[in-house]
Image: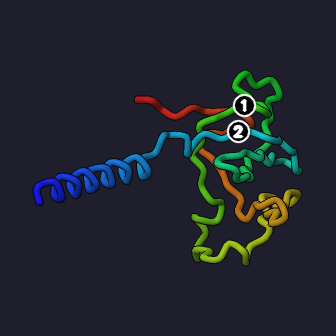
């Protein structure tokens, strides 16, 4: 009977440990690979990949062409993304209802369902094409 409880205890302990490992984040959830940068009107669409999913990040085109902090295609960046429509009022609950978003009178950005892009995002880490790292303080 004691061996049964020992086995049961070992199984329970290993299950709990495995569950902790599966639920813990390795910190890679916010690391994105920039795949493409495309200018649309006065804005840029930055296509970034994370966990086999493509995200379309929209940022205003820079007025200064000589940026030393410029993000580059093929590089990884730690980003915080926000859905463009999450701050709309009334709040949009179904993103499929909104396929395009007008950023100014000359610029219309759209989702791209054929590429798996169903939302447009923005990031406080990207201003124009300049990468602003997280504050480490």
Q: Residue at x 85, y 57 (%)?
A: 107
Return the residue nearer the eye: 89 or 4. Answer: 4
Q: Position of residue 86 (x, y in %)?
A: 59, 65
Compared with 119, 11 (above or below) is: above
17 left or right, relative to 108:
left
Q: Position of residue 67 (x, y in %)?
A: 75, 25
Q: Which residue is mark 1?
A: 75
Q: Residue 129 falls in which quadrant of the image?
A: top right
Q: Residue at x 57, y 32 (%)?
A: 133
Q: Which residue is mark 2?
A: 33
Q: Residue 84 falls in which quadrant of the image?
A: bottom right
Q: Residue at x 24, y 50 (%)?
A: 10
Compared with 66, 76 (above or below) is: below
Extreme-left residue of the structure = 2
Compared with 97, 59 (above or below) is: above
Secondary structure under the numbered disc 1 in the rendered image: loop
Q: Position of residue 35 (x, y in %)?
A: 79, 41
Q: Position of residue 17 (x, y in %)?
A: 32, 48
Secondary structure under the numbered disc 2 in the rendered image: strand
**Where's the N terminus, which quadrant?**
bottom left
Label number found at residue 11:
none
Quick one: label 1, few (<14), some, or many (20+) residues within 10 Å? few
Return the residue nearer the eye: 76 or 26. Answer: 26
Q: Residue at x 79, y 30 (%)?
A: 64
Q: Tell me whether circle 1 and circle 2 mark residues in contact (CB < 8 Å).
A: yes
Quick one: label 2, few (<14), some, or many (20+) residues within 10 Å? some
Q: CA distance from mark 1 to mark 2?
A: 6 Å
**Where's the C terminus, which quadrant?**
top left
């Amino acid at each position: 009977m004691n061996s049964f409880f020992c086995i049961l205890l070992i199984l329970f302990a290993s299950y709990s440990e495995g569950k902790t490992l599966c639920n813990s984040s390795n910190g890679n959830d916010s690391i994105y690979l920039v795949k493409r940068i495309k200018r649309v009107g006065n804005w840029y669409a930055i296509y970034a990949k994370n966990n086999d999913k493509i995200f379309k990040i929209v940022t205003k085109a820079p007025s200064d062409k000589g940026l030393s902090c410029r993000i580059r295609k093929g590089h990884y960046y730690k980003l915080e993304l926000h859905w463009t429509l999450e701050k709309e009022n009334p709040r949009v609950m179904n993103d499929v209802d909104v396929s395009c978003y007008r950023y100014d009178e000359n610029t219309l950005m759209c989702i791209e369902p054929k590429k798996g892009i169903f939302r447009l995002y923005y990031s406080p880490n990207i201003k124009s094409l300049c990468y602003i790292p997280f504050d480490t303080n």
